[in-house]
Image: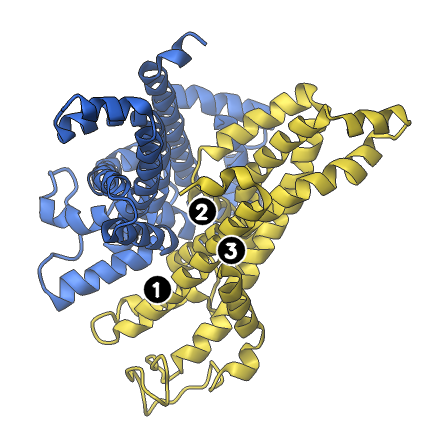
Amino acid sequence: MVFLAFLVIHLAPGDPVDLLYDVDRRSVSPEQLHEIRHSLGLDRPLLYQFARYLGRVAYGDLGVSIAARQPVASEIARNAPSTLRLALAGVLVAVLIGMPAGILGALRRNTWIDHVALAAAVVGIAAPNFWIGILLIYVFGFLLGWMPIAGSQIGVADSVAVLLLPGLTVGAAGAALLARLTRSAVLEVLRHEYIRTARAKGLRPSRVIWLHIMRNAAIPIVTALGLSFAGLIGGSVIVELVFSRRGLGWLLVGAINNRDYTLLQGLILVYGATIVVINLIVDLVYGFLDPRVRYA
Amino acid sequence: MGALVVAGIVLSAILAAMLSPYPPAAQDLLRPYERPSRAHLFGTDGFGRDVLSRVLWGGRVSLLIGLAAVAIAVALGGSLGLLSGYRGGAFDRCTSMVVEILMAFPLILLAIFIVGVFGPSSINTMIAIGAGSVPSFVRVVRAEVLGLRERDFIEAARALGASDRRIVIRHLLPNVLASLVVLATLRIGTAILAESSLSFLGLGVQIPDSSWGSMVAEGRNLIQRAPWLALIPGIVIMVTVLAFNLMGDSLRDAVDPHDAGRA
């Protein structure tokens, strides 16, 4: 996968050195350009360059950002926490809103609660997240004047207020998906005999819900949660821009607009690694939750 | 139901030239930022351009890119899936591995990466979204082929001396077509969302072309003064995506009765 990221950079039209010195075309002669290329190792075979890159990455050296002239690694490290907070907020929103909605919908099937929840879920999936963000800004920021609209604080913990709207926006799609899935999973479990047994035993409904229903419905739900985290990461890029938050997404778009390929490469690496790690965790959790899988 | 809405949307996009009450680029600087009214159903923007007309014309771009991207994905993904499923072996294992890795990534992220490397443009957006959608098609088609491969009629064809190519084209392909169509329809909605997101970020359709996504981006800074500029294209996107999703769902129910019970 790292190879893919690396390949990506070299697929880009033009030479990194050309880009670097493009502005100063007049002051740098072709001979000097050739010298620079040689010193950077750009005229060596591709595989060799890749090997060198791997070596550097192992030491945490991701190269230097072309535009900012700062090490890529430190740029990414600086902006990562903000994005992380946003992603976590999104997960919280998805779980806290999506799951109860799904459970309620399943328990009160075909009542107005169910219909409202389903309708909201459908909207959440079909509506573009940047639009939801703008809508929220308009309604809560301008019309009602309740919430602060933009910005984030790097390094210091965000106050809940600043994180609320962006979190809602990022989590909306996830909540919708989770709601639908939870509803299906719970409905599936409800059909089984042991639920009737539990109710007949006289258990309190809440205990029935937690002990029996959720335990068994947990498996597909957790899988969906883990998978939707990847979607959250994608959505965070856009939401960061909508709410003018400085984070990895903002860095990414900036890198693209500035043709800052080193930074782009580093970002692809980081995003990719994150997604792979999350999938790994989901697999592990899945194995832990479902004993049947463990011995497979 | 979904099909009806889709047909309506597609039709209005094709006939945008006839349906727009005003040419989309026509500026009327005397009437900027008008609220939706009888004269301008969706209001006007900062240059006095009629928003409805712009939405109709922007729809052509958005729909075109979305459909083209899915077409690319169907062609590439379908062929890869067929080949991979039928041949098996190292090729299959290799392809499956790459597909699994790519499937972990959200489409928007993949598309952003690809556009980031090759530069923002409408064509690159189309290619990026198409390429990003390929993995899911490969997976679905491959699964179908794996199921069909051992069936009697395939073996019969082989016994009759049919070449591999003939088997794939003449026997496997028609049977996979149904799932392909369902998936394609469902993915169009995703593709349109991806395109609008890219355009919103400024990485998709470039000026002077405009698509629904870029319209939302333009309207965003004026949200307080003229909220309809950003909100209306967004609603249009949502309705379109919804329509395609509904259509895809009903197609799926028609094709595969087993899934009809899903919520």
Q: Colour of chain A?
A: blue
Q: Can residue B138 be seen by looking at this rendering?
A: yes
Please report contact status of discs 1 and 2: CB closer than 8 Å, yes or no: no
Q: Which residue is mark 1?
A: B217
Secondary structure at badge 1 equals helix
Q: Horizontal placement of B51 versus A70: left or right? A: right
Image quadrant where one finds the C terminus of chain B: top left
Q: Is residue B186 above or below residue A107?
A: below
Measure the C-alpha gap from mark 1 to mark 2. Answer: 17 Å
Residue A182 in percent (x, y) is at 31, 36
Mark 3 to mark 2: distance in Å? 28 Å
Instruction: Give the spatial CA distance, label 1 vs label 3.
Output: 28 Å
Depth check: give the residue in front, A119 or A223: A119
Q: Nearer the viewer, mark 1 or mark 3?
A: 3
Residue for badge 2: B112
Q: Please, which chain is the residue tagged with disc 1 on?
A: B
Q: Do tags 3 and 2 sit on the same chain?
A: yes
The residue at the point 52 percent across, 25 percent down is A50
Q: Amino acid at mark 1?
A: Ala
Query: Residue A71 occupies which quadrant of the picture?
Result: top left
Query: Which tag, 1 or 2, sits closer to the chain's start?
Result: 2
